[in-house]
Amino acid sequence: MMLNTVTANTDIENWIAMPTATERAVASFTPITLDEIGDAALLNRVETKYVVSADTLPTFLTAIRDDYRVLSIEGERLNRYKTLYFDSADFDLYHRHQAGAANRYKVRSREYVETGTTFLEIKHKTNKKRTRKQRTMTNQFLSVIDRPSWDFLQTRYPHSVDALYGRLFSYYKRITLVSRHSAERVTIDLDLSFEWEDRRKQLTDIAIVEIKRAPDAERSSVALQLRQRRVRPTSFSKYCIGVTQLYPHVKHNNFKPQLRLLDKLSQETTHAYYH
């Protein structure tokens, strides 16, 4: 999106540092720390995803402010994530998702930039539509599977660990909201970008809203607000969408609805800016 022209008298450094409308909206939430989150980590959960225009976040966040607290780490409420996804040379894990397999896995190395902590994670989507995440802390961000990580995966991952290679980097900022009323956590990912070797794709026009809740959690205020805005749940995998963007030769027919949605939101953002 284009920036407004700055006059000669503008203090450039202050102008660049001015918070965005989304940052101002997030600043109005009551904060919560990592230690306070506790059970809201929800490693065994039901997930529902939505994709929205990033321009709608300020009004959306204002509408739900009283029902959630926002995670604050070292004073930062938009926290940076770096992720490396592992897959086989033939993208076996990607293809299982592309084919609609009900029982599938993701393996990834992740860094929480603000804290400097790193994990190797296994994310398992079961045939009962539950998501289970297991992880182990690592000494550094892993670009290859080292021996301790190999041992961790060997007992939890049903496919060949030796076949796993780094295939895609993703970067984004995340807003994490914790419900005041039920076992629910909401993440909002924005400024998403993908990289591999000399290829790069940015998706700055969208935000991914994901509700993560215990199976018996009460109705979500976020879901209610999105329904009122006529935003429907959708399947959206950052890894799989990243593969479609950086590996166009890899089959992606089943992701065409998500790709059309991305184009639609991008066009809406461009139209709103120029009008």
Image (cartoon, rainbow, N blue to C red):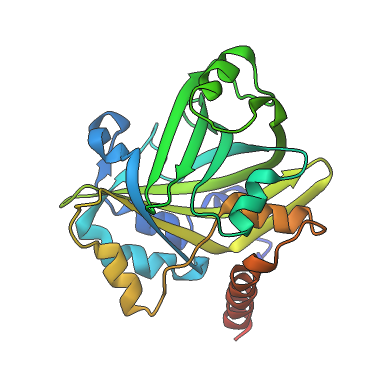
Determine the image quadrant of residue 269.
bottom right
**Above or below for 157 versus 63:** above
Which residue corresponds to the image point at 54% horizontal and 49% vertical from the top-left? 17
| Quadrant showing the N terminus | bottom right
Please state which of residues 112 and 218 is positioned toward the viewer in this rendering: 218
**Can residue 1 be seen here?**
no
**Above or below for 139 versus 8:** above
Determine the image quadrant of residue 66.
bottom left
Which residue corresponds to the image point at 39% horizontal and 54% vertical from the top-left? 129
| Quadrant showing the C terminus | bottom right
**In this image, 211 relative to 3: left or right?**
left
Residue 151 picture location, percent across and down: 55, 16
**Can residue 172 be seen here?**
yes
Please state which of residues 202 and 40 is positioned toward the viewer in this rendering: 40
Residue 216 picture location, percent across and down: 19, 52
Which residue corresponds to the image point at 64% horizontal and 67% vertical from the top-left? 254
Residue furthest left as drawn:
181
Please state which of residues 74 and 155 is positioned toward the viewer in this rendering: 155
Please state which of residues 62 and 250 is positioned toward the viewer in this rendering: 250
Residue furthest bottom as drawn:
275
Which residue corresponds to the image point at 42% horizontal and 68% vertical from the top-left? 233
User: For the image shown, how many numbered marks are present on the structure?
Assistant: 0
**In this image, 164 relative to 275: left or right?**
right
Residue 236 picture location, percent across and down: 53, 60
Residue 139 picture location, percent across and down: 55, 15
